[in-house]
Image (cartoon, coloured by chain):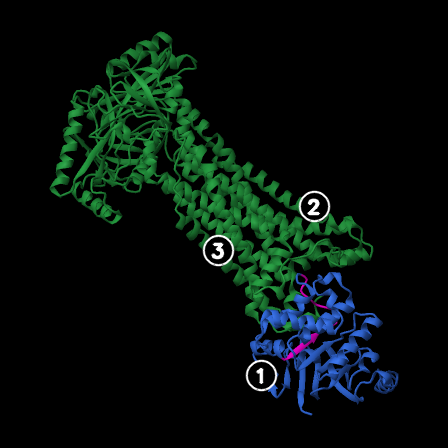
Amino acid sequence: MTNILEVQDLCKTYVVNKRQNNVLKNVNFSIDEGEMVAVMGPSGSGKSTLLYSVSGMDGITAGEVRFCGKSVSKMSQKELAKLRLDEMGFIFQQMYMLKNLSVLDNILLPACQSDKMKESRKETAQRGHALMRKLGIIDIADNDINEVSGGQLQRACICRSMINKPKMIFADEPTGALNRASSDEVMEELAKLNSEGTTIMLVTHDVKVAAKCTRVLYIVDGNIQGEYRLEKYDKTKLRDRERALNGWLMEMGF
Amino acid sequence: MYLRILKKDLRRKKTMNAILLLFVVLAATFIASSANNLITVSSALDNFYEKAEGPDYWFVSINADDVERFQTFAKENRYDYTVSELIQIDSKNVLVEGKKFEYSNTLCLSTLGGSRIFDKNNEEITHVNDGEVWVTNFIFEKNDNNFYEGAKVKISQNGVEKEFTVRGYTKDALFGSAMVGMTRFLVSDNDAKLFNNEENAVANSVEIHTKDPDYFDKFNALELNTIMSFDRPMFKMIYLMDILIAAILLVVSVCLILISMVILRFIIQFTVTEEFREIGVMKAIGIPNFAIRGLYAAKYFAIALVGTLIGCTLSFPFSRIMIQSVSRKIVISGEDNYLVNIGAAILAGATVVFFSYFCTRRIRKFSPIDAIRSGETGERFRKKSFLRLGKTHLPVVPFMALNDIFSGIKSYVSMILIFILGTLLVIIPVNTINTLRSDGLITTFNMVESDHIISQELLFNPNEDNQKKAEQKFSEVREMFAENGIDVDVFQEIMFRTNIKKGDKRTNSLSFQGLGGVTTDMYTYLEGTAPQNPHEVALTYLTAGQIDAKIGDDVKIKVGEDTKTYTVTAIYQSMNNMGEGVRFYQDAKLDYNYAAGSFGMQVNYKDNPDSAALAERKELLEELYPDADIYTPGEYIGYMIGNVAEQLDGIKALILAIVLGINALVAVLMVKSFITKEKSEIALLKAIGFKNTPLTLWQTMRIGTVLLVSVLVGAVSSLPLSMLIITPIFQMMGAYSIEYEIRAAEVYLMYPLIVLAVTAGAAFVSAQGLRKISSAQISNNE
């Protein structure tokens, strides 16, 4: 397995009212291709900041982040935008979408903006349809975004994150705004994508979500305090995985 | 607490509040100065005429016997009247600062007497010192003359020579407009006597003050030979061109008020909508509706108060600038009517406060949670846009721009209205100016079209063989051209002042006969056929209407001492003397001793030269006639009706600057508000890999597309609207059927492109603000 993401001595400091706030303190970790890594920790521990910093969405104060061997921290804004467009996918807690576009158009938007696929608009639309079909939301393709449920919308966000066939998906509490049933459905989809080879890094508070991952990083006060490795996800052993993970998290003080 | 919230709000939303304040200032300034302008200008002419003690009737006659007859008549009828002498001076005999004096209509020397005359400070001129001269404003400000206070004017005519010092310009009710066709230099009694000799023609200006309703009929029955005759209503028409400028400014002001109001409504609605979440929180914790509304009303009251104060202050100088062009010609007594400014500015401020309170009425309707959801209930009864990214070949950026417009067309309505109005404001004055300068308009001035016009108007003396004098001049010109190898037709319009009668209805009118080979069939008629023999005439709508004459009727026309019967064969239009006119057949025998004057000498080249050759020949003419001015027909109209087109040019530039400024502000405002509103969407797009450039283009294209459509609609509708607006003005001046000069390249290309470029440029610069939004902000946005 090769490293897709490598983080060395990552520091992130915010200055608020002339006071320094060190959110991330010398964070080191790496993620291999095909992994599904969850970041957990108490509120304000720096989980989301870590996700945004390593994905190039936010700048870093010190350290190094390498994505597919390239230094993200040294990239210009234009290079970062291209990287996010072509090689990364993003899912957010709130199902952010452009309100004036239909669900399908929201999904197609990154593909139409990218020149990665070298395909016609029709072919892009076909891929969009295929993704929606795969995630079971083909019926809502032409709907406006306010006409569909949160669960359907988050699945549409997953489709959008997948449309450019990214090497890695970053998800910030992807089930945070969903009910249990929808949350399970979305996580099943993510696990399925992972099993098909997509690397995923996600932030969550939810043990049930984290239990579907292959590794869990536990972060406290901007430092990774520990990691917990799990076997490849198997739906039938979910309860055992959850129980084991819960035990470890309790040990970590979660 | 209100003050604390207000202070914090002002700090936090600096840009939006600054723009809101700016528009309150603009609205207050425009409303206050326009109200002042409206009140001042609408009553200005009547007030001026009253203040000047202008006559109810006025005529000028060169015939001393006729003036004597009038005086007897006036005494019998106990009419109050004054007679003053006008000593005619040939413009060629006048040098201003050593340079030729540019004026080809009748110039007279006159003394004080009759109606009151005012200086630039609206003070009545009660005394003129020897050696000093006062000049009417339109002559004083004519660009090609070199008049200024203290300038030296040398007049030498028929052996008398005197140098005068220009004291200043006058506001002269009788001679203050170029449309009168005659002007005067005001000199002292002694200086006037110096030039009053037998060799100089002296006309009499007679001003009559009477309320006798039968005066006009009685006067016409006298059948006096006059070279000019006006009544009070006609004076208003003479200043129509000046009022036109004021009217255009007025229309512009009203449009600007509308624009300001639309923008204010948009900003207030937008800011209130933006604050719905906070409103929701306040409602949720139990603050009553009136308290919440009061909070916002307090904020807008503070902005309205500051804006109104600034706007009111700015409106004082602005009012003066707006009526400056008119107030230089006539006395405007309401110039300092500051109470109007203050009242109008307060009204503007109150409207803002009312608007803001009105816009907050939605607060009452929504539950706290609705408000937290930004006033959206999520209900939607129709699809947003019909455009689909997957089904179109449009690139992403134009697609998003178009899709946004189609998804929420209502939010673009204000912008569309403002841009259309702005485009119309720019194009309509351009069409008016171009029409006023068009060569074709010459046919409405009792002339036929010609290639060039030489400003060699003839001055006739009663004791000369004037027809012979004119024809001699034509052959001189023809010969001079022949020497240069150019074959030309030379002709000229000779004017008479005639009395016309049909049954018991009488009037007097300017009448025309073409000399030098021009024939009646070369003129334009609206009804009937051209006069074919010496006993036939054509009348203008106005003249025919005054005596109730129709085609086929016989009318009696008195030229000098001869009264003959003529048959009316045609009706035509004329802008001379607001529609007066009689056209005689070219061979009709008229008494040229009574010719009142002529237009410039018209030249037509028989070889139909192209525009380049025409320009060369104009240069040749300028060499051949160094003492004269050479005009194209369009230029000659400007010369006859004064520098209205030049003044309109100035206004056009002012309007263009205002429209561009407003458009740029609207574009900045819209882009800023869109960016504020769409912060989370921009952050999302950045997060999924959109660079700054396509996002900037998206914002710009959205404004650009709306602008393009608006400019197109504005440009297309400008033609019928121009006609709708300009036609009545021309009709008032006597022209019923005008061919509008629409210069497509200028109207449909140049100005729309300027408006597009400046507005889109402003939108683009403003859209750079989205660069500050980072993709990471997505997690901070709700």
Q: Residue furthest bottom?
A: A1
Whichever of callouts 2 and 3 sits on the residue coming sooner in the sequence is 2
Q: Magenta stretch?
A: A87-99
Q: Quadrant of residue B326?
A: top left
Chain of residue at mark 1? A
Inspect the image, locate mark 3, and give the three-letter code of the amino acid beneath it. Answer: Leu
Residue B55: % across, % down: 38, 21
Of residues A239 and B25, the one nearer the viewer is: A239
Chain A colour as displayed: blue
Number of labels in the image equals 3
Residue A30: % across, % down: 70, 88
Is residue B206 left or right of B492 when viewed as pictured? right
Q: Which residue is mark 1?
A: A74
Is residue B446 highlighted in magenta?
Answer: no
Whether residue A45 is visible to the viewer of this picture, yes or no, is: no
Of residues B29 and B462, the one nearer the viewer is: B462
